[in-house]
Image: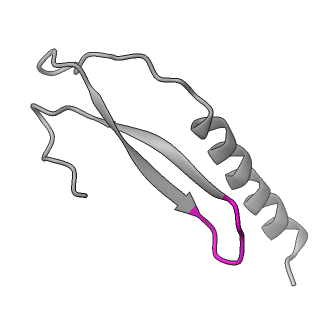
Amino acid sequence: METTSNAELLQSFKDFFDRKSAILLEPTKCEWCGSTLEYFDAQFWFYENEKEWTIPLRFCPSCDLQPRQ
């Protein structure tokens, strides 16, 4: 059984993921080297919940390590 504060926290996470998954990202430049940042899709979900979110996470292909598949 969830307490009110747990339910509110879970709803806050859901709201956050809903907002972040709906954002359209414009190409931006790395502040260190000037390369165009790239994005890969990260998936988030909660156990016992059918909702899943795909959030684009950015990285610099020149400065950051290669993302893992």
Comparing 42 with 33, the one in front is 42
Residue sitting at x 14%, y 47%: 66
In the visual, does 62 lie left or right of 19? Answer: left
Residue sitting at x 47%, y 23%: 25
Type of colouring: one colour
The magenta segment is 45-51
Q: Quadrant of residue 18?
A: top right
Comparing 1 with 37, the one in front is 37
Residue 39 counted in the magenta span: no
In the visual, does 57 lie left or right of 50? Answer: left
Residue sitting at x 15%, y 40%: 64
Residue sitting at x 50%, y 44%: 55
Image quadrant occupied by the N terminus? bottom right
Residue 46 counted in the magenta span: yes
Q: Quadrant of residue 32?
A: top left
Image quadrant occupied by the C terminus? bottom left
Numbered marks: total: 0
- Placement of 62 over or under 11, stated as above or below: above
In the visual, does 11 lie left or right of 66? Answer: right
Picture coordinates of residue 63 (x, y %)?
11, 34
In the visual, does 24 lie left or right of 26? Answer: right
Picture coordinates of residue 45 (x, y %)?
59, 63
Residue farthest along the bottom direction in this orientation: 1
- Placement of 57 over or under 1, stated as above or below: above
Q: Quadrant of residue 4?
A: bottom right
**Could you tell me what secondary structure mostly forms the magenta stretch?**
loop
Picture coordinates of residue 42 (x, y %)?
43, 51
